[in-house]
């Protein structure tokens, strides 16, 4: 990790938020509620902000820190990413620094001197450091413009990313009552929203809840058959040269999947908490700094990742909650360009998740909450309606069908599964009531299909009244029935072996008072309709509307950017994002004045890169 250059000179603050936006970041207008949020903080008020990944949360505290007197203190949960966050700000002329355990004493001392001298606009600290009394005493020696609590959902004790040190952040309100605070998160149900508000003492804050819709992400869920082969087909067919993230549930699966993708010719790297810290850091750095790298990870990876050109996020195991799924898929397409969220799941995922819940520490209320999370995730997987509508409904927001998810592009066929459901439920009842036995899905399917297996013969299950009454459906179709009945809450799995039992709701089906609609199960997992395969990096980067000559210029700009980033030791997106390079290629600027109007080119970047950009344009003409 390269060292920070000391920044000791104080500079004048900006008079207005609009001036800071244009001069520093190169944008002419705010998006959504950014302007209102920024005005709230500049005026000294508190704010709670729920905004999707890629929605522009960072500007909501960065710009007030450039306008208000003092230094903005940003609570960031991952020290491994602070360097990149600071590099990105330094690249646009913001006086930013961080304090964490990765620095030597001399560097920390210089940062502390700069802060006390008022020579920093933004200072990033981890919640663990901020919870110490010595850090609070140090901060009291300087002037604080605001506190920004990023990834605020980490304060939720029942959330998927709980961090105990976030609980101590409530003391900020008591210690600095006149300093405005902003809590930000990219995901929160109504319950988590209330928990953030309460635990951080933000009851008097103004709340801003943006739409959680990410229209550029195409959500797709497929039935699991051979997940690694399915994943490989998805990547090679649609994203052969793209950066992406693949999530798996276990460390073993992460390493096996990364090895499989590597052996198949893809640039894939593993990431999980069990790897050596240096290996994790190296793999993360390669993902951030190189093009086309795929990270295969547990959920230990991803929070705070700002890489804008992640074109896909794939899950080869069922996520534990819709919140976790949304947070993870949100790491795709931060630049607003078309991206994919791909998930494969099957019956065994449900059995495994239920077993993990049964074995989890905590009281009954905790396990019920985990079960509710899983039920919501299953409902998303098995819906016959628009995925996006279902996803947004979970966060309390309404939406019309999107036309850009698998269920919209290829509507699933529904069929009346009441009779098959009754056959399965009746078999479970007869085994339990007549013989006090419980079995898993595989054995129940064998009974229904009339398969003579050693276990069937051993228990005499070929004598049951339901023996072979389901021979009209295949194994694959019956497993789909089981999976969907689990999703509809008519059956549950129990114990280490995932045996099946009825819920109270099953009685209505057995009595004929409730019908059961099911998704049609194809014999072979079908690929959802996909966009036409793109050719060339220009189209891959969202530059499909460029002419051939402009596309060649875009390629030349990307090559220049890569070389510039390597020389500086920073990710390519810190130099310029793809969207800015597309705009340059389309405009073919001939002067610095022409560059000044292009989105994403502020004063510092114009000064640093303007002549170099013009040279690339001239050479390509």
Image (cartoon, rainbow, N blue to C red):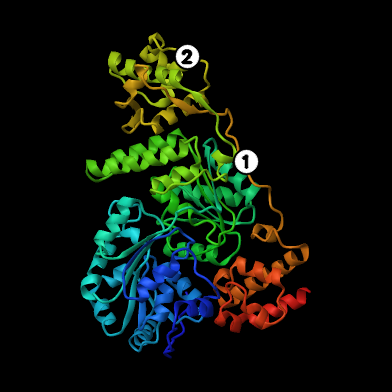
Image quadrant in which you'd find residue 444: top left
- Mark 2 vs mark 1: which is more N-terminal? 2
x, y percent for residue 458: 38, 14
| Residue 529: assigned label | 1
- Relative horizontal placement of residue 117, taking residue 388 as reference (left or right): left
- Residues marked 2 and 1 touching at CB (< 8 Å): no
Task: Give the x, y percent position of residue 493.
Answer: 35, 31
Q: Is residue 295 visible?
A: yes
Where residue 114 sits: x, y (%)?
A: 37, 86
Helix, strand, or loop for circle 2?
Answer: loop
Residue 201, located in which quarter of the rendered image?
bottom left
Farthest-out residue, bottom: 9
Foreground: 225 or 595? 595
In the displayed structure, does residue 496 sit left or right of residue 279?
A: left
Looking at the image, which residue is at 41% across and 11% down? 462
Residue under numbered circle 2: 450
- With 526 as the anchor, is 155 left or right in this view? left
480 vs 495, left or right, is right
- Residue 89 is tagged as none
């Amino acid at each position: 990790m390269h060292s920070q250059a000391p920044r000791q000179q104080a500079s004048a603050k900006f008079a207005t938020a609009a001036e800071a936006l244009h001069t520093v970041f190169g944008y002419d207008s705010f998006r959504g509620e950014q302007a209102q949020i920024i005005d709230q903080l500049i005026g000294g008020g508190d704010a709670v902000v729920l905004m999707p990944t890629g929605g522009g949360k960072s500007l909501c505290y960065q710009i007030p820190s450039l306008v208000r007197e003092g230094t903005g203190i940003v609570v960031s949960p991952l020290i491994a990413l602070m360097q990149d966050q600071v590099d990105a700000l330094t690249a646009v002329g913001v006086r930013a620094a961080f304090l964490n355990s990765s620095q030597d004493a001399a560097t920390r001392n210089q940062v502390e001197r700069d802060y006390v001298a008022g020579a920093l606009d933004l200072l990033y600290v981890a919640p663990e450091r901020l919870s110490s009394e010595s850090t609070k005493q140090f901060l009291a020696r300087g002037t604080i413009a605001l506190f920004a609590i990023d990834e605020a959902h980490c304060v939720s004790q029942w959330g998927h990313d709980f961090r105990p040190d976030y609980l101590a952040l409530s003391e900020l309100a008591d210690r600095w009552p006149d300093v405005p605070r902003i809590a930000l998160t990219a995901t929160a149900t109504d319950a988590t929203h209330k928990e953030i508000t309460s635990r951080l003492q933000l009851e008097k804050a103004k709340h801003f809840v943006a739409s959680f819709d990410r229209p550029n992400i195409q959500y797709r869920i497929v039935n699991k058959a051979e997940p690694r082969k399915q994943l490989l087909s998805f990547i090679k067919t649609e994203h052969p040269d793209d950066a992406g993230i693949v999530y798996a549930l276990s460390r073993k699966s992460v390493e096996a999947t990364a090895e499989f993708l590597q052996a198949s010719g893809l640039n894939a790297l593993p990431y999980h908490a069990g790897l050596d810290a240096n290996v994790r850091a190296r793999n993360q750095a390669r993902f951030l700094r190189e093009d086309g790298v795929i990270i295969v990870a547990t959920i230990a990876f991803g929070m705070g990742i700002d890489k804008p050109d992640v074109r896909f996020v794939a899950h080869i195991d069922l996520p534990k909650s819709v919140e976790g799924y949304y947070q993870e898929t949100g790491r795709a397409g931060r630049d607003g360009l078309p991206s994919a969220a791909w998930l494969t799941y099957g019956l065994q995922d449900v059995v495994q998740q239920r077993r993990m819940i049964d074995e989890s520490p905590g009281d009954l209320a905790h396990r019920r909450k985990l079960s509710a999370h899983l039920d919501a995730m299953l409902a998303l997987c098995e819906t016959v309606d628009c995925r996006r509508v279902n996803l947004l409904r979970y966060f309390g927001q309404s939406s019309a069908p999107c036309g850009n998810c698998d269920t919209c592009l290829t509507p699933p066929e529904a069929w009346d599964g009441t009779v098959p459901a009754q056959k399965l439920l009746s078999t479970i009842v007869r085994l339990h009531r007549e013989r006090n036995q419980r079995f898993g899905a595989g054995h129940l399917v064998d009974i229904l299909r009339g398969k003579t297996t050693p276990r069937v013969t051993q228990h005499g299950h070929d004598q049951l009244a339901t023996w072979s009454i389901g021979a009209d459906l295949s194994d694959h179709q019956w497993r789909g029935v089981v999976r969907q009945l689990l999703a509809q809450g008519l059956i549950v799995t129990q114990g280490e072996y995932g045996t099946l039992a009825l819920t109270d709701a099953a009685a209505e089906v057995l009595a004929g008072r409730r019908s059961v609609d099911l998704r049609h199960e194809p014999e072979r997992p079908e690929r959802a309709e996909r966009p036409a395969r793109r050719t060339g990096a220009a189209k891959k980067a969202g530059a499909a509307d460029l002419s051939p000559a402009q596309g060649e210029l875009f390629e030349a700009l990307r090559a220049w950017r890569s070389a510039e980033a390597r020389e500086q030791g920073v990710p390519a997106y810190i130099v310029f994002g793809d969207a800015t390079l597309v705009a340059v290629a389309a405009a073919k600027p001939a002067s610095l004045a022409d560059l000044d109007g292009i989105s994403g080119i502020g004063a510092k970047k114009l000064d640093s890169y303007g002549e170099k950009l013009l040279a690339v344009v001239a050479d390509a003409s």
